[in-house]
Image: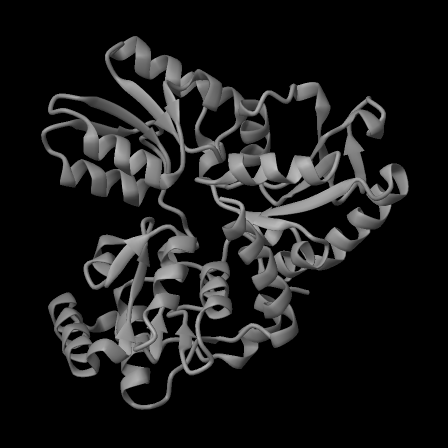
């Protein structure tokens, strides 16, 4: 059972009355609390958050960037993390004991992070090491639970982000013959392929079948990919790219490396959330983009750059459902609980798990 499932019953739900408060009234009350608490209150907002929440963010970024920036702000006593559960966990791991990290809605999880739990991972490790011995170094995408980060840390591995996965995987393959990459198979596959590792030297580990999905001998496999994925980025397809190009060959398709391998290969460009934002920010007026990532970010980029044509590669895509659980009513409720001296939704990673997870994070920082 994950930490998320264990702590959920401890926290109250937002009172339904908050849904009936007019938007202007909610915004006024949020601004008043921010002004009242000043530097003692910090609101980090992930790129994929709703605009109604991002407008109050003291900084925006990806999950690890926000956690690191929060850790640097030692004045903040309360950090209201507008993202999802694993992000708030990472923030708690990196911040100081006097700082409370708060998630406005404890139901804001991540389906990808939930695809790898400790029981499954320990079974996989035992079975794999029986087959190939002490030749595996585990790596985990930061989009994973604190428990999985701790497992990786205990076994000498590191975390990775979509921005630094190439550097960390390159480092890992100098330490061991092969790696176990959790929990997103697509980022692992796309990154390893960029590093020149052929697809037939990669195989998916199915945690339910408890085996490698390959006809090859395990000794021939260098990249073991956990059978996990992002439910948003898997919805982009090569057919969408073909249709985009058919309608307008001048449109450049840019996608996130959490997309499937065939989509990344077919796209004009691929990179992390920050990479996508930077490419569009630097593009000249008149540029045309079809973007394969979360819808809230695509809409925000389009609003920020009216001089460009920016659309989603999948126009029927919904925003990330779990990320969107953080909305204006939940943000206001969370802040008013703090203002009353009764903060709720506090994220507190157990010390033993935090220490091992921090070692995985620090190992990443050492090698990028």
**Left or right of residue 108: residue 290:** left
Asked whether the viewer can see residue 14, the reply is yes
Asked where in the image residue 76 lies, by quadrant, the reply is bottom left
**Left or right of residue 293: residue 209:** right
Residue at 34% across, 78% down: 78
Asked where in the image residue 134 lies, by quadrant, the reply is top right
> Height in image: 345 above or below 120?
below
**Left or right of residue 110: residue 103:** left
Report x, y in % for residue 184: 58, 41
Report x, y in % for residue 60: 28, 54
> Height in image: 262 above or below 359?
above
Q: Quadrant of the N terminus?
A: bottom right
In this view of the protein, which residue sits in the foreground, 315 or 153? 153
In this view of the protein, which residue sits in the foreground, 238 or 217? 217
Q: How is the image coloured?
A: one colour
Residue at 40% across, 73% down: 102
Report x, y in % for residue 249: 27, 9
List the single residue furthest toward the bottom: 341
Residue at 45% across, 80% down: 12
């Amino acid at each position: 059972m994950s930490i998320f499932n264990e702590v959920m019953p401890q926290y109250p739900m937002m009172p339904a009355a908050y849904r009936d408060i007019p938007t202007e009234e909610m915004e006024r009350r949020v601004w008043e609390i921010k002004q009242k608490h000043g530097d003692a209150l910090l609101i980090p907002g992930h790129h994929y958050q709703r605009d109604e929440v991002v407008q109050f963010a003291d900084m925006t970024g990806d999950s690890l960037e926000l956690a690191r920036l929060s850790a640097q702000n030692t004045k903040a006593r309360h950090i209201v993390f507008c993202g999802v559960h694993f992000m708030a966990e990472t923030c708690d791991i990196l911040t100081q004991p006097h700082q409370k990290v708060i998630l406005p809605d404890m139901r804001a999880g991540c389906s990808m992070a939930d695809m790898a739990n400790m029981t499954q991972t320990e079974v996989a490790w035992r079975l794999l090491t029986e087959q190939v011995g002490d030749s595996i170094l585990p790596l985990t995408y930061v989009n994973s639970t604190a428990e999985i980060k701790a497992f990786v840390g205990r076994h000498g591995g590191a975390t990775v982000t979509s921005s630094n996965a190439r550097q960390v995987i390159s480092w890992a393959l100098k330490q061991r013959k092969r790696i176990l990459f959790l929990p997103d198979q697509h980022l692992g596959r796309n990154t390893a392929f960029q590093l020149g590792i052929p697809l037939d030297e990669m195989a998916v580990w199915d945690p339910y079948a408890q085996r490698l999905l390959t006809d090859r001998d395990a000794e021939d496999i260098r990249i073991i990919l956990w059978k996990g994925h992002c439910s948003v980025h898997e919805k982009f397809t090569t057919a969408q790219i073909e249709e985009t190009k058919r309608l307008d060959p001048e449109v450049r398709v840019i996608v996130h490396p959490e997309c499937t391998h065939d989509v990344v290969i077919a796209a004009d460009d691929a990179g992390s959330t920050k990479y996508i934002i930077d490419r569009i920010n630097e593009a000249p007026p008149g540029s045309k983009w079809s973007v394969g990532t979360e819808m809230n970010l695509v809409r925000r980029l389009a609003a920020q750059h009216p001089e460009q044509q920016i659309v989603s590669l999948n126009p029927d895509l919904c925003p990330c459902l779990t990320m969107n659980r953080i909305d204006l009513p939940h943000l206001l409720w969370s802040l008013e609980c703090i203002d009353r001296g009764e903060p709720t939704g506090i994220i507190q990673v157990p010390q033993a798990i935090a220490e091992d997870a921090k070692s995985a994070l620090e190992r990443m920082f050492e090698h990028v």
